[in-house]
Amino acid sequence: MVPRPDFESYYGKPVIKAPAWSARDIAGYFFLGGLAGAGSVLAAGAHATGRPTTAKAMKLSSLGAVSLSTAALIHDLGKPSRFANMLRVLKPTSPMSVGSWLLATYGPAAGTAALCATTGRLPRTGAAATAGAAALGPALASYTAVLAADTAVPAWHGAHRELPYLFAASATAAAAGMALTLGPTRENSPARCAAVLAAAADAAAERAVERRLGPVAETLRTGRAGTLLRAAQVLTAAGAAGAALLSRRSRTASVASGLALLAGSACTRFGVFAAGIASADDPRYTVGPQRERLSAAGG
């Protein structure tokens, strides 16, 4: 009997080229964009239910987050003109093109909502801008998952169905954390509910991603990605528990829970990014799933 050979690529080289994206810029862009988009939804809810302090804080937070995310994207591109060039054409089949237009449309709406909330002027304009930013918020929070899954990176493309749900849940957890951190205790009941629901959805989505990836899910459990994602699980669970049990009565507990949720969301985005790079660097995760699919099709 001839032993089954172990897979080896040509001189051990990767089969595909890993994205030349900076982890700080692009993973940070993923996190900040999600925080901005989900934050606008919470801001609209707070605005509509008579929670002015939280609404104003979340509008300013979303403006700051989308500004920083745009700066991170432009820094990774190398110069601002490259971002402007992406707006010359709208290509619905390109996640990058759609995302660029989404970012360019959402930013002014978030800025107008924050400006009107800060100055107290043009309340109708501010309400319309708040509603517009909230309408675009879910797409902004999750489109980066589509952007990543549209590549050939095994850990991203293999989970193209589940990754948007994970990003949306993570973004909601971050926005709830920001609301708990900045809003007064008397106004934080929606943020507490959002934190608990987002933590549960985040855990379920991450398990779904691991099931979908099969052997490639090893990249989510080992190395830098494994460390970050384990930290994300602990921080998100702790933040949700603190929000549900303690933040109603204690401002300190509310802030601590919010910071834990924010940190957990950031670790999720950076962990998923690191897993993708690790899966692209190891040829086993590219060729192994291909052979399994071919074998299943042949059977």
Image (cartoon, helix red, strand yellow):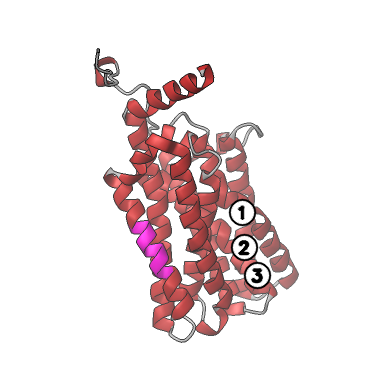
Is there CB contact under 8 Å for labels 2 and 1?
A: yes
Q: What's the magenta bit mostly, secondary-structure-wise?
A: helix
> Are the two marked residues, 1 and 3, in contact with CB atoms closer than 8 angstroms?
no
Q: Residue furthest front?
A: 1
State the residue lying farthest toward the top.
2
Q: Which residues are magenta?
A: 231-239
Amino acid at dot 3: Gly
Q: Residues within 10 Å of mark 1 (few under 14, many from 20)?
A: many
Quadrant where the N terminus lies? top left
Secondary element at image label 1: helix
Residue 203: % across, % down? 46, 56
Residue 253 in percent (x, y) is at 40, 79
| Residue 81 seen in this snapshot | no
Q: Nearer the viewer, residue 276 or 217?
A: 217
Q: Which residue is mark 2?
A: 41
Indicate left or right for 225 with 74 as reference: left
User: Judging from the image, what secondary structure is the residue with disc 2 in?
Assistant: helix
Residue drawn at 39 percent across, 81 percent down: 252
Instruction: Name the residue tied to disc 3.
Output: 45
Left or right of residue 15: residue 44? right
Q: Which residue is mark 1?
A: 138
Q: Is residue 149 left or right of residue 291?
A: right
**Residue 258 rendering spot, x and y as whole percentages:** 43, 70
Look at label 1 and name its amino acid: Pro
